Amino acid sequence: MPDAIILVGPPAVGKTTVGAALARQLGLEFVDVDLLIEAREGRPISEIFATEGEPGFRSKELAATLEALDGGGVVALGGGAVTNPQLRAALVGRQVVWLRASVREAVKRVGQTTTRPLLVGDVAGKWSDLAASREPLYAEVATIEVSTDHRTPAQVAREVIRALADEEAR
């Protein structure tokens, strides 16, 4: 297995829950970059967005992500992390898993009330727009794609492990 397995994808595709299940199945450490940032800052991401704007948050996100990548294990990135060219460059040559979900599944997971700052309001519309605008960036960095629709986190984790094994066998 690679030094680090990185999970990317839009909000609510299961990066945190699948990442934890994957790490557990592989006996690796798990880091969720969003949770790492919140722990360091002592406040939720929504508050960071409100007080420092998206650029302020993205700066913190880049620093935390680069550190997490160096630590290895399973690393779940924030949904918008791939918008940073420096971060995308840091993913070159690494195992990056793009977790995908349908709009219906993502909205069901998020619900209509959300603490995700970029999804407040029209969750379905905003999620669709975010996913579509970032799709080329996820495609650029991903070495593997796995759908999370109608699957448990453990099932998705097993699929990721199979896909990683197939990649290594090539």
Image (spheres, grey):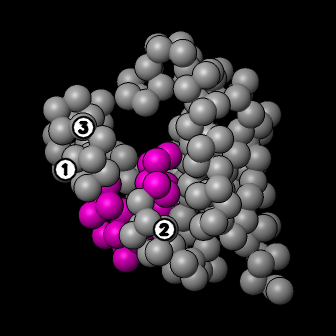
1 vs 2, front mark: 2
Where residue 16 appears, x then y in whole percent? 51, 46
Disc marking residue 88: 2
Magenta-highlighted stretch: main secondary structure?
A: helix
Q: Is residue 106 at least partly visible in the picture?
A: yes
Label 2 crowd (10 A; few <14 / some 14-19 / many >=20):
some
Where residue 76 appears, x then y in whole percent? 49, 55
- Element assignment for label 3: helix
Where residue 18 appears, x then y in whole percent? 60, 48
Q: Amino acid at mark 2?
A: Arg
What residue is disc 1 on? Answer: 40
Report, in whole angstroms, how far the alpha carbon at label 1 lies from the one at label 3: 17 Å
Quadrant location of the C terminus?
Answer: bottom right
Specify the segment rendered in magenta. 61-83
Report, in whole angstroms, how far the alpha carbon at label 2 lies from the one at label 3: 21 Å
Q: Amino acid at mark 1?
A: Arg
What residue is disc 3 on? Answer: 53
Q: Earlier in the sequence, mark 1 or mark 2?
A: 1
Magenta span contains residue 32 = no
Magenta span contains residue 71 = yes
Q: Would residue 127 be found to the left or right of residue 32 on screen?
A: right
Residue nearest the observer in this picture, 80 or 157:
80
- Element assignment for label 2: helix
